[in-house]
Amino acid sequence: MATHKSAEKRSRQNVVKRLRNASVKSSVKTRMKSVLTAVEEKDTTASESALAVAIPAISKAASKGVLHKKTASRRISRLTKKVNSLKG
């Protein structure tokens, strides 16, 4: 357990940040899953609209530091590739 005043504050901040990061990660995963289910059902309009919601969520998580920049880029790329495979 932290004994210095600054270490106690840092411990409190870490708890808040951990909970916030978990919430953001969970919402990103949910949005990604909605894209993947629409792709599995071969529904182009639903998959495109779900992708339009998922991309900004992933990008925002990366800009906030919840996801690494390249991880976000890879996830966006893979989702886009799957949605585009329905077209052609």
Image (cartoon, helix red, strand yellow):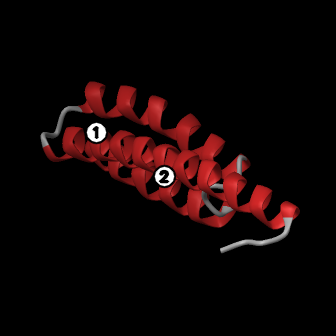
The secondary element bearing badge 2 is classed as helix
Q: Nearer the viewer, residue 48 or 31?
A: 31
Left or right, 73 with respect to 9, comes to left
- Single out the mark in the foreground, 2 or 1: 2
* Amino acid, disc 1: Ser
The secondary element bearing badge 1 is classed as helix
Quarter in which the C terminus is drawn: top left
Q: Residue at x 29, y 46 (%)?
A: 33
Residue 55 lies, in percent from the top left, at 53, 39
Residue 46 lies, in percent from the top left, at 27, 27
Q: Nearer the viewer, residue 14 or 39?
A: 14
Farthest residue, direction left: 41
Q: Residue at x 51, y 44 (%)?
A: 24
Left or right, 88 with respect to 23, comes to left
The answer for how far apart the CA atoms under marks 2 and 1 are is 18 Å
For label 2, the residue is 22
Q: Residue at x 42, y 36 (%)?
A: 51
Residue 80 lies, in percent from the top left, at 44, 48
Residue 58 visible, this orientation: yes
Residue 80 shows which numbered tag? Answer: none
* Amino acid, disc 2: Ala
- For mark 2, does the 10 Å Cα neighbourhood hold few (<14), some (14 to 19), or many (20 or more) residues? few
Residue 34 shows which numbered tag? Answer: 1
